[in-house]
Image: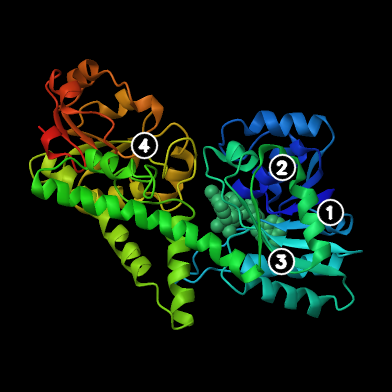
Amino acid sequence: MLITVIGSGYVGLVSGTCFADFGHDVICVDKAEDKIEKLKGGQIPIYEPGLEELVASNVKAGRLSFTTELSDAVRTADVVFIAVGTPSRRGDGHADLSYVYAAAKEIAASLDGFTVVVTKSTVPVGTGDEVERIIRETNPDADFEVVSNPEFLREGAAINDFKRPDRIVVGLTDERAKSVMTEVYRPLYLNRAPLVFTSRRTSELIKYAGNAFLAMKITFINELADLSEAVGADVQDVARGIGLDNRIGAKFLNAGPGYGGSCFPKDTLALVKTAQDHSSPVRLIETTCSINDQRKRSMSKKVAEAVGGDVRGKKIAVLGLTFKPNTDDMRDSPALSIIQALQDKGAEIHAYDPEGMDSAAQLTEHVTFGSDAYEIAKDAHALVIITEWNAFRALDFGRLKKDMAAPVLVDLRNIYGKDEVAKYGFSYTCVGRPDQEI
Ligand SMILES: NC(=O)c1ccc[n+]([C@@H]2O[C@H](COP(=O)([O-])OP(=O)(O)OC[C@H]3O[C@@H](n4cnc5c(N)ncnc54)[C@H](O)[C@@H]3O)[C@@H](O)[C@H]2O)c1
């Protein structure tokens, strides 16, 4: 199969590389010249474990290449995946589809022979119809089918998720397109990944339904964390107690500072907007969005209380900036809201993250970045863990105590407990575990 992927970001680059690793011939296209230059030079523009090696081996095998020239790459392709961004549209929360539609127009002009055009980007119901309309209008003679194939990979575990997916969802009606998509994913049959064929609109909705459900699950346990604090219960035991029920499941039940990232915030909002447009509101998701928004900023109150009620003029050391570990993605990270709220209250922020500091520097102001936990903790009045990178799971509290202005730990990911830090004289604040606080 000759596969062309338009958009070489987190999804496009991982998908293209994995398709090449399955044995397909893949061209990854991006209009960002610096990105393509880096990729041609063997550099990976994002942080994703294992990706550098996989790109290198497939480039070496001659199955993977990179270009900014969309038209040549489309002309030769059997399948063209659209994997461009669909961020929130400024002002109203709808998905911004301008990149998808621009890509569709460019693709249309270069189609040659029967080609399957696949939206891998997360797009609202009906986008496939519009992509089809745009292509037909731009190139009335083109022989093509538009298919929906949303992506479910998680940053930080993207290669494994792509190669061992829980399911592959494909939305189409045409039999020729079905046989092409079957061929594209044939290498995964060995892993018995269920291929769910459905209509294009259903496939588009499945992606949003999945993300909205997970966002709701996180928000549910976050509210239970607040309730646990109010009634003297332990939210981690609550999560375990309900998660062992197979109907509920243990995943996505870790209480914390609220969900962030490049998908959940924008996708929940876009689903709310789609539902409103169709006069069929999804009130659970509307509420989920507003609870989560408030939660992120409200975490600054925990920090203020931990330092005696007021952070004004105090140095706060923030550990972890990305929305989750093992990625450099800062999009909608809770850290951004928490830092802003602390700065609004007059705190001086010093921060460290293993991979996210370059992006964080562009998204924050007046933050001093350090090279590790110990450097930023020097003279700090509190150390606040926002992202649970493995590197933060075995901190040397004896050393931190000597260097900090006050031994105060605010653990927004519940990775420690009072027994571990009390012996070093630290006060401890966490989420939903009042019996663990000191
Ligand atoms: N990041 C994730 O974890 C994830 C997971 C599942 C689904 N998704 C969805 O996948 C889509 C892509 O997300 P991402 O995180 O990879 O985005 P991204 O911003 O990392 O990458 C998008 C890339 O597309 C390029 N691009 C835009 N228009 C182009 C055009 N006309 N021609 C060529 N290149 C173009 C951009 O330069 C950019 O490099 C989104 O719809 C997102 O919701 C993302």
Q: Pick the quarter of the image with the C terminus.
A: top left
Tell which tag, 4 or 2, sits nearer the viewer: 2
> Of the residues shown, which amino acid type is indicated by label 2?
Tyr
| Residue most extreme to the top | 398
> Of the residues shown, which amino acid type is indicated by label 3?
Leu
Q: Tell which circle, 3 or 1, labels the residue nearer the N-terminal end.
A: 1
Residue linked to disc 4: 320
Mark 1 surroundings: few (<14), some (14-19) or many (≥20) residues within 10 A: many
Q: Position of residue 300 (x, y in %)?
A: 21, 48
Residue linked to disc 1: 73
The answer to whether residue 382 is left or right of residue 435 is right
Q: Is mark 1 within 8 Å of ligand 1?
A: no
Question: Which secondary structure, mark 2?
Answer: helix
Who's the residue at 11% across and 46% down the image?
A: 310
Identify the image quadrant of residue 234: top left
The answer to whether residue 204 is left or right of residue 353 is right
> Of the residues shown, which amino acid type is indicated by label 1?
Ala
Tell which tag, 3 or 2, sits nearer the viewer: 2
Cβ–Cβ below 8 Å for labels 3 and 2? no
Mark 2 surroundings: few (<14), some (14-19) or many (≥20) residues within 10 A: few
Q: Quadrant of ligand 1?
A: bottom right
Separation of disc 4 and disc 3 at Cα?
Answer: 42 Å
Q: Is mark 4 within 8 Å of ligand 1?
A: no
Residue linked to disc 2: 189
Residue linked to disc 3: 172
Question: Is 374 drawn above or below residue 35 in the view shown?
Answer: above
Who's the residue at 71% across and 34% down the image?
A: 55
The answer to whether residue 334 is left or right of residue 25 is left
Tell which tag, 3 or 1, sits nearer the viewer: 3
> Of the residues shown, which amino acid type is indicated by label 4?
Gly
